[in-house]
Amino acid sequence: MLLSLAIIILVGLSAAALFERIGLPRIIGMLGVGIAVSPYVLDLLDPSILGISSELRQIALIIILLKAGLSLNIHDLKKVGRPAVMMAFVPACFEIVGYVLFAPLLLGVDRIEAAVMGAVLSAVSPAVVVPRMVKLIEEKTGTQKSIPQMILAGASCDDIFVIVLFSTFVTMAQGGSAKAADLLNIPVSIVLGVLLGTATGYAVTFLFERAYLHNHKIRNSTKVIVMLGTAFLMMSVETLVKPYIALSGLLAVVAMACVIKLKADKRVSARLSEKFGKLWIGAEVMLFVLVGAAVDVRYTLMAGGMAVLMIFTGLVFRAVGVTLCMLGTELDPKERLFCVIAYLPKATVQAAIGSVPLSLGLPCGKMILSVAVLAILITAPLGAIGIDRTQNVLLESEKE
């Protein structure tokens, strides 16, 4: 296991630095290393690492979401309002519709299988989008109109919506009946996640303040560890209550961090955000190398040109959905184009659920996994490069 960790960290960081040096996003180098060392290519990783890969990826996501919450300004998010809510589900719905309409023609699947494929492929990747939006918030680029805040909030909710739809469509594909009540899990999951995170955020802040009043000063590094432990606990609560009620642990994590930022001294929240930024250096490598390692590139050969055409058709439908969300806002055409670009990348959700239809024995399983793998390889670099190259061209920086 230690050798595998050494490969992930050292080779991953080296590839990230190399790609950054030649002007490409670090993520491409890390994904490339993951694919190269995966069981499907060189097979250099210990099975024990691969066995806990999903948990390690989740820890990395928690770290960047805590940083996102500490960087997010609630007042800015309130200013955005309707578009932020619409971004959580409208683009995904449009992309699923694109798959339902065109996947039967291009890939030979039936409508229900096309809906399952659309649900797998329609989730935006928070792992690609969130750190870039956090960086824009810190650099005050696009923040005058709260563009990164809106994208960050939408991307954080988008996955919940898509995963609930995925579960519903899979049930239908297996011959079961989808219940309308299942769709109620979406708002319930969001509301309960925010409530849990808000309550926990107040409790953690109270703990820090009481310790300070009693002259027990808690170091910022210790606060980071407490916040991480609490975030892990909330993710565990999501798992424990899953059989009974839907609750989003990831949204709870963001909400907790937002409350701590709101209640804590500005200097303290800034230092906490900085420390989570340092943790992200290692977590980022772990996340993207392991996402790459989960990609079975053998299936890309099965997909073919029609799968590529389907992926880009889905992205066109997605772009229409994002554009619809922007109607009635103050955003100019360049800023709206940036929002479309920022909503392109796919990686984490596709790596996590792309193989589920195959494992359940659905006839379309291999095709869905093939398209999911291809979508990661195409859209993750495309979205990352698009955001990095256009942010200073399409967005305005706030003047100091």
Image (cartoon, rainbow, N blue to C red):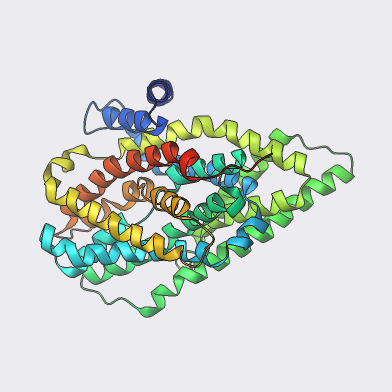
Q: How many marks?
A: 0
Q: Work out which quarter of the rendered image holds the N terminus and state it.
A: top left
Quarter of the rendering containing residue 321: bottom left
Q: Is residue 388 left or right of residue 67?
A: left
Instruction: State the residue in front, 244 or 296.
Output: 296
User: Which of 311 and 15 lies nearest the eye of the viewer?
Assistant: 311
47 in relation to 319, above or below: above
Residue farthest right in this picture? 214
Classify residue 368 by image quadrant. bottom left
Is residue 61 among the parts visible in the rendering?
yes
Locate the C terminus by quadrant: top right
| Residue 292 sits in quarter | top left
| Residue 65 image point, x, y percent | 55, 47
Q: Position of residue 178 (x, y in %)?
A: 31, 76
Residue shown at 73% from the left, 35% from the top: 220
Q: Residue at x 71, y 42 (%)?
A: 269
For residue 103, above or below residue 41: below
Coordinates of residue 145 in the picture (x, y in percent): 58, 54
Q: What residue do we see at 35% from left, 48% from top? A: 346
- Left or right position of 34 against 246: left
